[in-house]
Amino acid sequence: MMQRLFARHALLPQGWSEDVVVEIDDGGSIASVMPGGDPSDTERVTGPLLPAMPNVHSHAFQRGLAGRTGRHSHDRSDTFWTWRDVVYDFLDQLDADDLEAVTTQAYVEMVKAGYTTVAEFHYVHHDVDGRPLADPAENAWRVVNAARVAGIGLTLLPVFYAHAGFGGTDPTRRQRRLVHAPHTFERLFEALVNARDRHGYVLGIAPHSLRAVTPEELARVLALAPPGAPVHIHVAEQTREVDDCYAWSRMRPVEWLLAEASIDERWCLVHATHMTEREVKELAASRAVAGLAPTTEADLGDGTFPAEAYLVNGGRFGVGSDSNTVIDPFIELRQLEWSQRLRLRRRNVLASDGDTTVGNALWQAALRGGAQAVGWRVGEIAPGMRADLLVLNTNDPALVEQPAECVLDGAIFGPARQPVRDVMCGGRWVVREGGHPQEAEVARRYRSVLSKMRAIGGS
């Protein structure tokens, strides 16, 4: 039976519209959108209706590390690289059941925050001791189960990781849970291909980074991906990575990918923080998506993405929760804009040239790039799109009496504590009045996992 929703205000591709009726078919897709529609025989949503946000980059298991990495080293040399050692400490304690529990907690938090699809950059492939599991896809199935319980659309990105550094350096013992040879990774990928239709995920592929794969391995892994499948890769997150890449190839990481990997709209270059002016222009022209995780990049001291220049050149971007220290698309967009303000000492840096506000411009741009990166038909309230929708919570003081054209600015830049009221994924309400039906049981399992964890070392 067709669902019919009525929203006093809805964010459509052309901007905010009034008195919008949205019809949703039995398959969870939007059948029609009627501004100025008749509200009779409809479910009236209680706040502004807008497309939900795709999450372009997640390591869900890292949710269990949030708040546990704040101890400084004695020489105060804490960096991304010392933080990575803490991640390995955590992985040494996390079995498949634990992985599923932590991932489910992260995914429930995502849908409550307004993310309805997630690109999971999945690299925890083996058992705690590094031995292959009897089913090479066992940990991937745990991610799939977590997405099912949470009700979130999953883009599964199995990660190929083979080396500790550029030029094929042998992996370390601490990376033992991550590492595959090309032939073992092919078996994993085949299992995921065979189960894709049954489980309903989008399947992409993720060479971890240029430091973790050789050029020959990169070509072999990319050949596995079906036509049009998303391809995600970490790149240029840290200046040390840039320097090491240049020492190996006499090219910077983004420069190397643009020259050697035929970058196009299938690709999502995660972070791409450190680029030259030429790289910015060429990446923007490639039609690839820059996968930004502004809160994680701030937490790890990565640097500031050159967003203004990238957008001026027509670049596409999406946002993700990455390490899941923060799970909130509104805060990701706030951090993105505020990082530019701090760097350039100007306000409203990423506003578009039209008369829309910076909040509207950021949300719409992240929807477009995010939908492209996750490979789902989402990101617009329009016929043929999956009905991934969220209703803003106008009882939050930051959103009270905000006019429609300013309500996203209130949610992104105001003191909003709970900006999301209801969330629909694929035509099904999964969050109502800020609550998820499984959250209590999911939280109980999550707490049980963390209660048995040993203390984590310094950051």
Image (cartoon, rainbow, N blue to C red):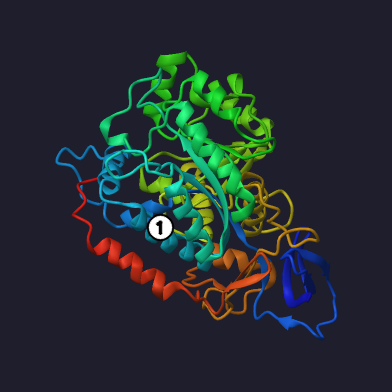
Q: Amino acid at mark 1?
A: Glu
> Compared to 334, does 82 lie above or below?
above
Give the residue at the far bottom of this rendering. Answer: 40
Q: Position of residue 228 (x, y in %)?
A: 69, 38
38 or 401, nearer to the observer: 38
Mark 1 Cα-neighbour bin, 10 Å: few <14, some 14–19, many ≥20: many
Is residue 320 among the parts visible in the rendering? yes
116 or 15, nearer to the observer: 116
- Image quadrant occupied by the N terminus: bottom right
Q: Position of residue 197 (x, y in %)?
A: 64, 51
353 or 87, nearer to the observer: 87
Residue 155 horizontal side relative to residue 17, left or right: left
Identify which residue is drawn at 73% across, 73% down: 9
Q: Position of residue 425 (x, y in %)?
A: 63, 65
Identify which residue is drawn at 65% across, 59% down: 360
Residue 266 lies in quadrant: top right
Judged from the image, the secondary structure of the residue bearing numbered disc 1 is helix
Identify which residue is drawn at 37% across, 24% down: 165
Is residue 233 among the parts visible in the rendering? no
Residue 47 lies in quadrant: bottom right
Q: Position of residue 416 (x, y in %)?
A: 49, 70
Label 1 sits on residue:
100
> Compared to 446, does 280 lie above or below?
above
> Compared to 407, does 168 lie above or below?
above
269 or 9, nearer to the observer: 269
